[in-house]
Image (cartoon, helix red, strand yellow):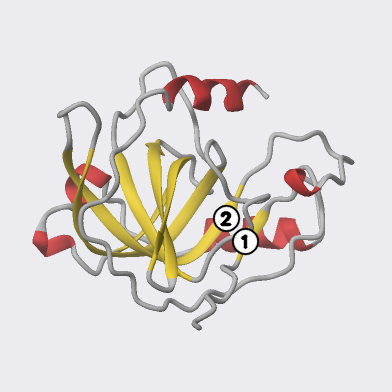
């Protein structure tokens, strides 16, 4: 619960809408989210093992905006600040958090003051992914955009989501939908 409150406090400066976003369809590997809390076993524990074992670059968002880093695969943690619909998908503006070796966000009193944009084909269930949700994004750097508020925008990386991991602060045994955690896949976008 304390990390939710800290995330809320850190997110008071919302990001402006992204300038140019055109995500491509990205495949995701997902396993079902069956266990609430942080159990010792089950599907969610397998997801944690997969998240920790992923081969990724150690770039920070600040480093990732350089052209030579486009295409690098990253695993970045943070909290969703804003969601924006795109043609056939969604982009999440994420406040970057330092993470542990397994990819879990670690909120400290010394915030990074960095954000990034993470885009996927399709949308996410709003009861699972919304503002203030703690996530870990795994994907490839595909470009840069400007994120900021009040005229203080900065160049930030755009990541094509390969996998999205949702974290929960709920107590073990709480089976509420908002207590689910693990990898989740976007819902297919419907084209009329």
Q: Earlier in the sequence, mark 2 or mark 1?
A: 2
- Looking at the image, the residue that sits furthest to the bottom is 192
Observer-nearest of 58 and 18: 18
Query: How many numbered circles are shown?
Result: 2
| Cα distance between the residues tagged 2 and 1 | 4 Å
Q: Where residue 121 is drawn, which disc sits there?
A: none
Residue 48 falls left or right of residue 164: right
User: Residue 137, how many percent across, how many down?
Assistant: 46, 55
144 shown above or below 131 = below
Please name the residue shown 43% across and 73% down the image. Answer: 88
User: Residue 112, how many percent across, how many down?
Assistant: 32, 29
State which quarter of the image contains the N terminus. Answer: top right
- Looking at the image, the residue that sits furthest to the left is 67
In this rendering, does residue 55 appear at all?
Answer: no
User: Residue 151, how many percent across, how many down?
Assistant: 15, 29
Q: What element carries label 1?
A: strand
User: Residue 176, how many percent across, how many down?
Assistant: 83, 44
Disc 1 packing (10 Å; few <14; some 14–19; many ≥20): many
Please name the residue shown 81% across and 60% down the image. Answer: 34
Q: Residue tagged by mark 2? A: 165
Please name the residue shown 66% across and 61% down the image. Answer: 47
Please say if the residues under marks 2 and 1 sit with CB atoms less than 8 Å apart.
Answer: yes
Q: Is mark 2 on a helix, strand or loop?
A: strand
Residue 120 falls left or right of residue 35: left
Please name the residue shown 16% across and 52% down the image. Answer: 65
Observer-nearest of 95 and 62: 95
Observer-nearest of 42 and 183: 183
Q: In which quarter of the image is residue 72?
A: bottom left
Residue 42 falls left or right of residue 46: right
Q: Residue tagged by mark 1? A: 183
Q: In which quarter of the image is residue 37?
A: top right
In this rendering, does residue 140 appear at all?
Answer: yes
């Amino acid at each position: 619960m304390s990390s939710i409150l800290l995330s809320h406090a850190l997110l008071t400066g919302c990001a402006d809408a992204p300038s140019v976003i055109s995500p491509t369809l990205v495949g995701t590997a997902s396993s079902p989210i069956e266990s609430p809390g942080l159990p010792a076993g089950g599907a969610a524990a397998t997801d944690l093992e997969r998240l920790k074992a992923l081969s990724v670059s150690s770039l920070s968002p600040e480093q990732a905006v350089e052209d030579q880093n486009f295409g690098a695969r990253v695993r970045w943690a943070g909290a969703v600040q804003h969601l924006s619909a795109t043609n056939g998908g969604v982009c999440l503006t994420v406040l970057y958090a330092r993470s542990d070796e397994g990819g879990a966000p670690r909120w400290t009193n010394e915030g990074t003051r960095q954000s990034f944009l993470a885009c996927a084909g399709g949308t996410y269930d709003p009861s699972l992914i919304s503002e203030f949700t703690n996530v870990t994004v795994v994907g490839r750097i595909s470009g840069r955009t400007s994120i900021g508020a009040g005229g203080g925008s900065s160049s930030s990386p755009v990541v094509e989501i390969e996998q999205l991991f949702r974290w929960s602060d709920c107590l073990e045994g709480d089976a509420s939908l908002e207590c689910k955690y693990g990898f989740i896949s976007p819902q297919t976008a419907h084209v009329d």
